[in-house]
Image (spheres, rainbow, N blue to C red):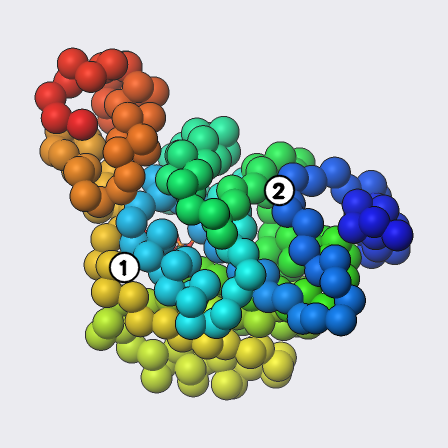
Amino acid sequence: MSVADNTTDRANEAGFGEVTHDLPPLGQDPTRAYRLGIMGGTFDPIHHGHLVAAEQAFGDLGLDLVVFMPAGRPAFKQDRKVSTGEDRYAMTLLATSDNPHFVASRFEVDREGVTYTADTLELMRGIYPENVTLYFITGADAIADIVRWRDAHRIAACAKLVGATRPGYDLESARRTIAASPYPFDVTYLEVPALAISSSYLRERVSAGQSLRYLTPDPVTGYIHKHGLYGLQGPSFGQRGEA
Ligand code: NAP
């Protein structure tokens, strides 16, 4: 049976109907184990902190691949306007395209309705064979909150978790929250100095007309300018100061 056949059958068993997807094949050799990283984030916009964190997870955890998965419809972000899934996916694709072990996926942005991580991971658990272990990588703040996410027990059953933090983050408090949960979360924490960069900092800089150079790959900056994101008034096509 091919990986694609497997996909449809197992997703059907899980009650999600037929699943079409752009996820990379993995797990073809049944005699070996594979590790797949899933980098989950809103990525509004993606920046070098995310890329360094994923590269560090790839090396430290011996991952085979890292799939960058921009969050679909983050209903949990009511406090501000989030860029469209199409824009966030496009920037993620541009940022990851030159790394052979990074892949950008539309898996969440193409899904109808609110996209919960429990559904995403359960679907992926159905897509990949048992010899592929899933590692869901995201910010440590988000991991500390995971106990309150919808169907957290399903997340614990499908994937190991990786919390990426900037040095100085209160890991003890995050560990206590996870330890107090009734679910068997398996969490690894990674300290990533580059996570001093944040998406909100980039958005503020754009709206103040400041440079994003060295904070995110240049093609992402180009995309932001071309599409007038984060308060820029219309496309600048290189005429609006420094890219
Ligand atoms: P967030 O609350 O906006 O982010 C919390 C912190 O983590 C921020 O400092 C953020 O920095 C950082 N962060 C986010 N993603 C990261 C990543 N992949 N690597 C390193 N740092 C990261 O979190 P979010 O972006 O909305 O959500 C993160 C993931 O959790 C997404 O996959 C989302 O779908 C999932 N989530 C699921 C549920 C649910 O199922 N109920 C609820 C919340 C979140 P930046 O702003 O710089 O990224």
Name the element at disc 2.
loop
Residue located at (78% from left, 67% from top) = 30
Name the one closer to the observer, 123 or 112.
Answer: 123
Q: Can you see residue 83? A: yes
Name the one closer to the observer, 107 or 16.
Answer: 107
Q: Quadrant of ligand 1?
A: bottom left
Compared to residue 54, the image places residue 47 above or below, namely: above
Spatial CA span between label 1 and label 2: 25 Å
Name the one closer to the observer, 34 or 14.
Answer: 34
Residue 150, how many percent across, how many down?
Answer: 61, 61
Q: Earlier in the sequence, mark 1 or mark 2?
A: 2
Residue 29, how many percent across, how many down?
Answer: 74, 63
Compared to residue 171, the image places residue 213 above or below, namely: above
Query: Label 2, on which residue?
Result: 107
Name the element at disc 1.
helix
Q: Residues within 10 Å of mark 1 (few under 14, many from 20)?
A: many
Residue 122, how many percent across, how many down?
Answer: 71, 59
Residue 40, how many percent across, how many down?
Answer: 49, 53
* Label 1 near ligand 1 (CB < 8 Å): yes
Q: Can you see residue 145? A: no
Query: Label 1, on which residue?
Result: 195
Question: Which amino acid type is marked by label 1?
Answer: Leu
Give the total number of marks visible in the rendering: 2
Residue located at (33% from left, 57% from top) = 52
Indicate left or right for 221 with 88 as reference: left
Residue located at (40% from left, 34% from top) = 94
